[in-house]
Amino acid sequence: MNQPLSYVHPTANSPWGTYLSQVDRVLPYLGHLARWSETLKRPKRALIVDVPIEMDDGRIAHFEGYRVQHNLSRGPGKGGVRFHPDVTLEEVMALSAWMTVKCAAVNLPYGGAKGGIRVDPKLLSQQELEKVTRRYTSEIGVIIGPQQDIPAPDVNTNAQIMAWMMDTYSMNTGTTATGVVTGKPIHLGGSLGRVKATGRGVFVTGREAARRLGLNLQGARVAVQGFGNVGSVAAELFAEAGAKIVAVQDHTGTIYNPNGLNMAQLLPQSRAKGVAGFAGAEAIADEEFWDLPVDILIPAALEGQITAARAQRLKARLVLEGANGPTVPEADDILASRGVLVVPDVICNAGGVTVSYFEWVQDFSSFFWDEDEINQRLDRIMGNALQQIWDTADRHKITLRTATFAVACERILTARQERGLYP
């Protein structure tokens, strides 16, 4: 008899609750593989670690860290590490599960994993940040490795943190293991094209979705929530394609210009201090962001941003999920009933993990590709994956999200079935 997980009690719209709802919706399309579906609802391994460090002022501080491996049936775990004061075990579980689906959706030979530390990195000095990173890496070192589980950057982590993680793991194992993480600096085995890969994937899938909707990108109005690595790159590429970025929201505030924001001026300011106070736009209340007259909405911040109430108000024809889990299930239903097309996170933002796969392959072979080749391979893989998902959606008359889960979960559970149970 299947028992519920005892260490987490998800609510309907919590990250793990949202994921479980998404799995339940795909069960009718799994055929005989549905008997294995409980596999999808249980992480294979969840590790909670204490991360103690000595602060610059001599105090001993403790932070809580996590690494969850959701499913390893198709290959080693793959997933980022986020440093955020609101990180929880349940959130990391959900993110690891979405990584399982995401990797299978684009047919990469990976399972899903995710990690995090409950810490506000803005309150740490550079030395303290390095200590937290290295101690966390040592604590989770028992379950990561180039053929076991490969971390990558996520919220508030970057190439420097990946370099510290790689170095710490390498020192502990006695060999330079560049393949233990992806998203590293180029001269330490990183890949060209990795920094912009997730935002590029949002643009590539968005361009195809717009084409199918008959939406001309030339002059299309785009609003972006979250203007970090994903949102800013996607905005830049849409602007280059002729679209107008009319609104941006980040942690500093929300700005709006119906005639379009000047990306060449906004991007440097946003990287330095955020979008608030940008001279080429008016400041509006954060909640007004969801009422703006736009054609394309890109939620590229955190989970649970498009609620049922906001879904009723959206004016966009197309939603491109740059973030993980930005739309709660009730909102999904409302958007579908209103004819709003949603390209789900598990395919829309899969560009990052795809180029991470390229980086991992290049590290093993010690042979590196140029950026044009990286982008061509990325565009081809994501285009083919989206085509198969769209065919599934058309065949079953289901949303792109359910179709993505159907394609991915079939691959995951086929691998589980063919491997069998041991012992």
Image (tube, grey):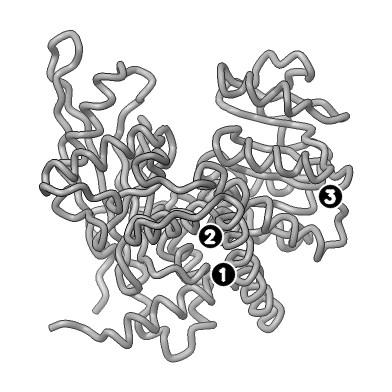
| Mark identifier at residue 404 | 1
Q: Is residue 94 visible?
A: no
* Amino acid type indicated by mark 1: Thr
Instruction: Measuring from the top left, give residue 131's x and y in whole percent.
Output: 21, 27
In the image: residue 71, left or right of residue 411: left
Q: Between marks 3 and 2, how big is the CA–CA gap?
A: 23 Å
314 to 359, vertically: above or below: above
In the image: residue 303, left or right of residue 172: right
* Amino acid type indicated by mark 2: Val
Question: Crowdedness of circle 1 by 10 Å Cα count: few (<14), some, many (20+)?
Answer: many
Q: Is residue 171 visible?
A: yes
- Residue 2 or 52: which is nearer the viewer? 52
Q: Which residue is labeled 3 in the image? A: 217
Question: Crowdedness of circle 3 by 10 Å Cα count: few (<14), some, many (20+)?
Answer: many
Instruction: Measuring from the top left, give residue 311's x and y in whole percent.
Output: 69, 48
* Amino acid type indicated by mark 3: Leu
Instruction: Measuring from the top left, give residue 290's x and y in whole percent.
Output: 72, 37
287 to 65, vertically: above or below: above
